[in-house]
Amino acid sequence: MCRTNSPELNTNDGQRTQFLQRTQTASRWNPFRRFDGADDARNAAHQGAVVSGLLALSYIIQSVLYIKYAEPADSLCLCTVVAPAVAAFALLLTWAIYSKHAFWAAAVLLVWCPIEVVFRVNNMIEHKAFSAPWLFVYIALIMATILCVRATLWLRSVHNS
């Protein structure tokens, strides 16, 4: 039996099992964790569906606010045509990830989410409205996206085998 410096691991097997269970539940937010089974992988994939749903919601809110508060001389084309189309695409990704666990949708989200975060952080810095809590939110969104890609890939490999 291997001894370690940790007193929690040098006790009997029951306590060791409890310690390992506590450390495994603490790693639930780790985007590189192992999946315990198909249900765990599906739940992880659903986190990516939440990310794409939040992106869709942000584009819908953006277009509604722009239409409501824009001056008549402003160009409404960008927010009346492009933003709803982007929101519809994000809703398609949400549906594909949540119901079909589609790897292609998770991969598109993995490319889209960091680009979106870079543009939003740049916009916050440019307008001197940088907020550290938003940075943590964006990091959590990227972590959920990575976890979603890994989960859909895992589900795909289990389904194909």
Image: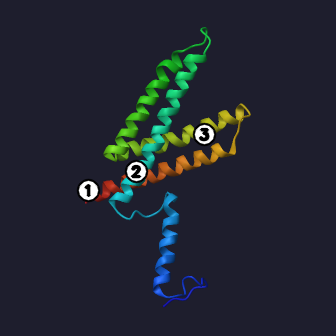
Whether tag 3 and tag 1 are in contact, CB under 8 A, the answer is no
Position of residue 140 in the picture relative to residue 124 (left or right): left
The answer to whether residue 82 is above or below residue 91 is: above
Q: Earlier in the sequence, mark 2 or mark 3?
A: 2
Using a 10 Å C-alpha cutoff, classify the residue at mark 1 as few (fewer than 14 neighbours), some (14 to 19) or many (20 or more).
few
- Measure the alpha-carbon separation of dots 2 and 3: 23 Å
Mark closer to the observer (2, 3): 2
Position of residue 86 in the picture relative to residue 137 (left or right): left
The answer to whether residue 7 is above or below residue 118 is: below
Give the residue at the far top of this rendering.
73
- Provide the residue designation for mark 2: 45
Expressed as whole percent of the image width and height from the top left, the position of residue 27 reads: 51, 64
Judged from the image, the secondary structure of the residue bearing numbered disc 3 is helix
Q: Earlier in the sequence, mark 1 or mark 2?
A: 2
Task: Indicate the amino acid at tag 1.
Answer: Asn
Q: Quadrant of residue 130?
A: top right
Quarter of the picture containing the C terminus is: bottom left
Judged from the image, the secondary structure of the residue bearing numbered disc 1 is helix
Give the residue at the far right of this rendering.
128
Q: Earlier in the sequence, mark 3 or mark 1?
A: 3
Name the residue at 49% across, 81% down.
16
The answer to whether residue 41 is above or below residue 91 is: below
Expressed as whole percent of the image width and height from the top left, the position of residue 30 reads: 51, 59
- Provide the residue designation for mark 3: 118
Task: Indicate the amino acid at tag 2.
Answer: Ala
Using a 10 Å C-alpha cutoff, classify the residue at mark 2 as few (fewer than 14 neighbours), some (14 to 19) or many (20 or more).
many
Expressed as whole percent of the image width and height from the top left, the position of residue 20 reads: 49, 75
Name the residue at 55% across, 17% down.
67
- Provide the residue designation for mark 1: 160
Task: Indicate the amino acid at tag 3.
Answer: Val
- Measure the alpha-carbon separation of dots 3 and 1: 35 Å
Position of residue 16 in the picture relative to residue 157 (left or right): right
